[in-house]
Amino acid sequence: MNMAPSNMVAVRDLVYRVDAARLLDRVSLDAHPGQFIGLVGPNGAGKSTFLKTISGLLRQQEGTVSLDGQDLDRMSVREVARTLAMVPQIAPYTHGFTCVELVLMGRYAHLGRFQIEGSADGRIAREAMRTTETEGFADRTLDTLSGGERQRVFVARALAQQPRVLLLDEPTSNLDVLHQLKVLDLVDGLVSEGMTAVAAIHDLRLAARYCDRLLLLSHGRVLAEGSPEEVLTPERIETAFGVRAVVYPDPMTGTLTVSLLGPADTARQARRDLRVHLVCGGGTGARLMYDLQHAGFTVTAGALGAGDTDRSAADILGVEYVAVPAFGGIDDDAHRRHTSLVAAADSVVLCETPIGSNNLRNLEALRSAKHLLVVEASPLAERDFTGGAAQKLLSELQPIESCRSREEAMTAIQAITARQKGRGA
């Protein structure tokens, strides 16, 4: 019979107030041994306050915190320090101490009253410094180090405590890219050995890559909790951060990644009854695909070959498209399906994609378009690899409007659809 893992950290309905403001409002969390929990959310969401309350640095007005089954309020400072270590967001300035002396401070919870560090404590401290690659700083004072180097020394001090719970408040905020990955790899390794880690992480991509579960905080409340895939949806990112985002699996790491596209448009109106079809390829339609979908249009595309950048974007966004083999041409069945999507659209956009023999039938399908718009910052002649057949086809189509950019195309589509709605089309 499998037993559920015990909670190393259990937080229930935590409330922390400053005057009348609730910085934490009924926040709960369960963290088991061998779990890496990420706290994400905008500035002021309550992440740092939550960590400080779990560590005992702040005292909640309501709710409970327990560490390994013990009520935090009933534990002594020494008992808490033997169970839990915290790495602060900003490494405090500690005048006059060398780095090895600071790391040795992590051993105080394990020493008796008036007891000084022994050889075993020294070995533990040195090992913590080797692990964090700070051994070379051992005899230097903190004031000679950069902010990122100091941060790593404080991680070493936390490890010297030999805690079972590690709390980290923005552990990568002062680190370069290499050491961001090294610190999180280090925490990930400790978690795999059974440690419990709870970290406030500013970078959503790093949070999704390293954390088993995420807690999304907004205005002191839990907006969402669960796996990165459950929490980091475009809708929740927009609600919490006020930005538009695309979320998709990273093809290299297999973990979720987040692309931030810009501030949210709070004035957008749903237009799901209006369809826009894109003829694109090679990455020429990906951003327009997203902008149209975000503006509320139903978007379709095609035909797109396997491995094409625009096809990958359509998969990420859930856009319907006609799939064809890479460099394999468009057969009769694919052409019929593509023509049907073109005919069903209120507006069709021909993006600035190169035209060759394998995708010439994309232009043929445009004969069924109700309204056609062509994006061309450069003449088609520069992208026509059909010996002039593409230019001849395009001249016969007589597009209703020509635009030089994606932004112009968006404006034109919105004007077209406004006219159509005004006519009841």
Image (tube, grey):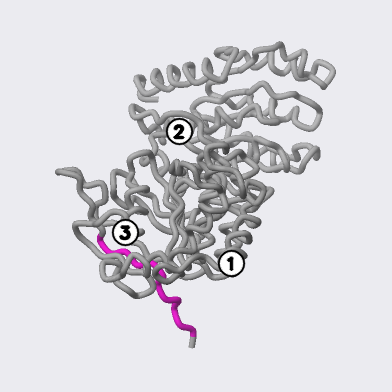
Secondary structure under the numbered disc 1 in the rendered image: helix
Q: Is residue 12 magenta?
A: yes
Total numbered labels: 3
Segment colored magenta = 2-13
Q: Amino acid at mark 1?
A: Ser
In percent of width and height, residue 256 lies at: 56, 50
Q: Earlier in the sequence, mark 3 or mark 2?
A: 3
Q: Which mark is residue 56?
A: 3
Q: Residue at the right extreme?
A: 387
> At 43% across and 22% down in the image, what residue appears?
417
Residue in the foreground of this view, choosing between 45 and 222: 45
How many C-alpha atoms fall within 10 Å of the one at disc 1: few (<14), some, or many (≥20)?
Answer: some
What is the C-alpha distance between the residues marked 3 and 2?
44 Å
Circle 1 sits on which residue?
192
> At 65% across and 13% down in the image, what residue appears?
377
Left or right side of 72 for 364: right
Secondary structure under the numbered disc 2 in the rendered image: helix
Q: Amino acid at mark 2?
A: His
Circle 2 sits on which residue?
294
In percent of width and height, residue 245 lies at: 49, 37
Left or right side of 408 for 79: left
